Amino acid sequence: MSTENFSRPDHVVVVGAGMVGLATAWYLQEEGVQVTVLDGDGVAAGSSWGNAGWLAPSLTLPLAEPAVLATGLRALTSPNSPLYVPFRFDPRLWQFLLGFARHCTPRAWRRAIMVFNKANRLALSAYADLTDAEGAGRVAEPTKAAEPFLAAFSDEKSLQGLTEELEQVATTGGPASFEVLTGEETRALQPALSRRVTGGVHLYGQRFINPGRFASALAEAIQRRGGQIRTGSRVSAVRRAGAGIVIESGQEPVLRADAAVLATGTWLGDLARAHGVRQVVQAGRGYSFTVHPQQVPTGPVYLPAQRVACTPLGTPAEGLRVAGMMEFRGAGEPLDQRRIAAIVGAASEMFDGVDWSARTDEWVGSRPCTPDGLPLVGRTRTPGVYTAGGHGMWGVALGPLTGKLLAARIARGVQHELLHHFDPLR
């Protein structure tokens, strides 16, 4: 860590009320800074609502991995592929894909996993800060121990693939404690799994949340401590004005602050480009829905071969969230029922006692992906303007850690070593 001369802000505006933006606002309050959070839609209205809610350091890994290219272009353009790229003319998408492909090498993956390992060792403690806080700052919604957290397989090759990946994480210093199980042992821990499951991996030390509920509780904690959250505020520009920052939002009066944090998820580039951030931020759309198994699993279930994540939402009556897909296309495009059907087709044979036709809460959300898989967290070329985004699938897992590191940078000038890797001007 290093400290440099800086001007401590009294008031910071955070643009974006997803997990990353809210966590940044909460940690700024911990530093004694007044905060205002602006969002065009509402708290957790984007990808912070319908995701799997995993706080799983062992599986929080770089998206750009050699196995992605090994699947081949034909697989990536198939509507049933877990990673889907629609074949069409979109210069910005292809610019992202070319950069992404350059990072799908063993050497680039090893560099990236070393950064992720550093972040993953700190991520759960950042959540603990939120839930263990005293008084008005405490986030009332808990994180839950993922016991058991199971990965389930129907073939030996896929099981071996995950164990090799976890061993790589462990040998590079990452948090990966696991045990390989037989199919019978796996089904005994989660009876909802079918006899198609012939093997499993029991991951230890993971946690999970109901992400929408947690984000709402985090927003309430911010407001109890005097922070403002304004929804319906679609920020059109953030600019330097004298010694401060001006935030423009439609017909509303301009808002002035000492600093601003851009935490707008997939739309990060729209505001950050004017401040020297040239990294492409591409929408990686994920899908989810809820089903109600006869026996709801007590902990998360991962189907690695199918790239499907399943999470119990709370009580058995609340059911099981089933999430999957990484679809590189426009953030504002409508939900594609073919993606939902692909998830159902992939997951249905792995469970018993599920009426897949009775699913509810079908959802699509856009996750902000960068070509190298690393977030964009830190100061921009404009003094007083910072970014916090580009986490891909891991905005929920790494959101509180991002907020903690960035708040220390803004309020005290402390630059954690991770922020060098996350530099938005790289």
Image (cartoon, rainbow, N blue to C red):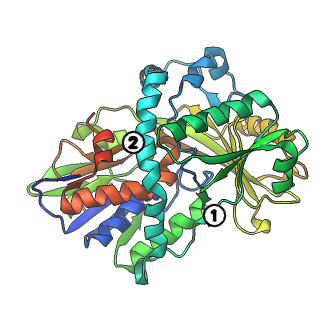
Q: Is residue 265 left or right of residue 46?
A: left
Q: Which of the marked residues, 2 or 1, is nearer the chain's N terminus?
A: 1
Per the image, label 2 sits on a secondary structure element best described as loop
Q: Residue 252, can we see it?
A: no
Quarter of the picture containing the C terminus is top left
Q: Quadrant of residue 375?
A: top left
Q: Are marks 2 and 1 in contact (CB under 8 Å)?
A: no
Identify the residue shown where x is 46% and y is 55%.
123
Image location (x, y in percent) of residue 117: 45, 44
Badge 2 is on which residue? 375
Q: Amino acid at mark 2?
A: Pro
Identify the residue shown where x is 47% and y is 29%.
109
Circle on res. 126: none
Per the image, label 1 sits on a secondary structure element best described as strand
Badge 1 is on which residue? 145
Residue 35 against residue 287 in the figure, above or below: below
Identify the residue shown where x is 53% and y is 28%.
65
Q: Quadrant of residue 254?
A: bottom left
Distance CA(mark 2)–CA(mark 1): 26 Å
Q: Amino acid at mark 1?
A: Ala
Q: Nearer the viewer, mark 2 or mark 1?
A: 1
Residue, far front? 171
Q: Residue 2, can we see it?
A: yes
Q: Is residue 83 left or right of residue 417?
A: right
Image location (x, y in percent) of residue 40: 43, 56
